[in-house]
Each structure stands twice: as structure tokens, then as C-alpha cells.
Amino acid sequence: MSVGVFDTDVLYDNPLLRKSELGKSLKRGFTLPSEEFTFGRANQSKDGGAAEAITGWTPLASIPPGKGRKEKKQERDFIALNKACVGVGLITAQEHFQYRATHDVRRQASEEEKNKTKIKRIPATVTFGVPTRPSTPVFDLIEHKYQDRWLQERRKTELAKRERVEEKETAQKGIYETRASSLRKYCPPVDAPPLWHMSRFREVLPHLETFRSIKTKDRSFKHHAYDCTARTGVFGHGIYESAKS
């Protein structure tokens, strides 16, 4: 069987068949493509940057109704899944895990989320931008129109308040009090019942009186009844308590 002669192009293209030159090391490199070749991967996605803006705009009117933005897949509704698990009779975590692996319930999108995903078609006659602010009326500033307007509003407010007060006073003037109506409303003061004492101590007077007079004693007891709510202790004789939230 005869051995054919290899072509030199095939020899140099295949590194396994390449022979080392005499006195030189074996070349392991590959030939590079021409200068017109562009390295890298083509960018198919559009990020809305400057390159896309320069190349052109895609009008919304040319987009078919069904070929709009893709709807985002809703998240799983774990509340509904847990409710269904309990309804079936599954309680443990392992049973819940197996039920979720075989069943799927998606959360319903709200109206607000649906409106966000919809493509809003802007009419061609709309004008973008902020409307021009009207110039400041210089003549109104010079003539103090704003000050006069403020004074008029304040004067109207004061007159309305005065009218309300006068109406209230005239309504109260129609009702007057007589002696009979005053006596009918009067409630005579009733003395509080005396404290309970044992029968053998009722007529016994105290041997020591620390108060100078009866008025001072009554005043002291009234002050104690008024001040005991903020003090500690059963009878309110302790120190003042701190504020409670």
C-alpha cells in the first residue's frame, strides 16, 4: 500500500501532522483572522442606551396588540397553598413540602400591577414638557395688590367671626334665670357621713391635738386627699411616683 504525499497547507493547518524545522522549535501558534474580523459576541439585547437612541426608535403604533411587553410570571401564593394543605388534612412540614411539589397556585395580580405592565399608547398630538410659567405681574407688585387682597380676606374673616359671636350673644339673651329656676337647679350641700367608731370610743376625746384649729385640720385632710393619688403606699403617704406611660 502506497503512502500519498501530504499537501503543505493540510500539513500546517493540522498541528498533529506538523513537523519541526531543522534547528528551530516547533511552532504551536495559530494564524489570526484578517483585520475585518470582529472579536466578541454580538449584543442582541436592547438596553435603551445611546446606541439604540441613535439607530432609531420603534413606534408603539407598529407593535401588534398581542406582541407587547411580556407579562411577568406571578409568584407562588403560599398562603393559598397552606390553606389547601390544611383543608386536605396535611399537617407536618414533610407533607406540606410534598403537596407544594405536586401543586402550584399563583398569586393574582392586583389592578395596580396590571396597569403597570400595560403599554400606554401616547397619542401623536400630545406635547411633552412642563407648561411655561406666566410672568410675574410687576404692576400688581408695585401697586401692592397682594397686600390689599390679604387685608380684604382678613377683614372678611374678622367680620364673619364677629357675626358668629353676636348671634351667640343674642341667642343667650333670650333665656334668663329667675329665682324659681335658680332654686330648682340648686343642690344643697350634704355633709359626708362620719367615720365609724367603736361605741366605747365615741365620747372619748383625744389626749393630744396636733392641729392648731379645726379649719387647719380640715384643710390638711383635703390637701392629703388631693395629693395622695401621686404618692406611693396604700394610704398615699409615700414618695411621689414617677410618670407612667
Image: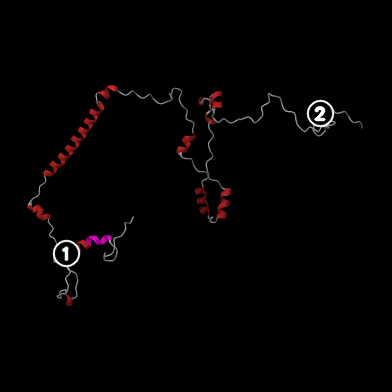
Horizontal and vertical percent position of residue 164 = 18, 39
Instruction: Tell whether position 82 is magenta.
Output: no
Quick one: SS at disc 1? helix
Q: Quadrant of residue 223?
A: bottom left
Horizontal and vertical percent position of residue 9 = 81, 27
Instruction: Tell whether position 228 is magenta.
Output: yes
Horizontal and vertical percent position of residue 151 = 22, 31
Residue 242 is labelled as none
Q: Amino acid at mark 1?
A: Asp
Q: Closest to the observer: 23 or 226?
A: 23
Q: Amino acid at mark 2?
A: Val
Whether pointer 1 and pointer 2 mark residues with C-beta atoms closer than 8 Å, the reply is: no
Q: In percent of the image, x 20 and y 32: which residue is there?
A: 155
Compared with residue 98, is residue 61 higher up or lower down, i.e. above or below?
above
Describe the colour scheme in one phrase.
secondary structure
Q: Label 1, label 2: how many angstroms apart (C-alpha)?
A: 127 Å
Which residue is denoted by mark 2 in the rendering? 10
Q: In percent of the image, x 47 and y 38: which residue is there?
A: 113
Which residue is denoted by mark 1 in the rendering? 218
Residue farthest toward the left in the current orientation of the protein: 179
Residue farthest toward the bottom in the current orientation of the protein: 200
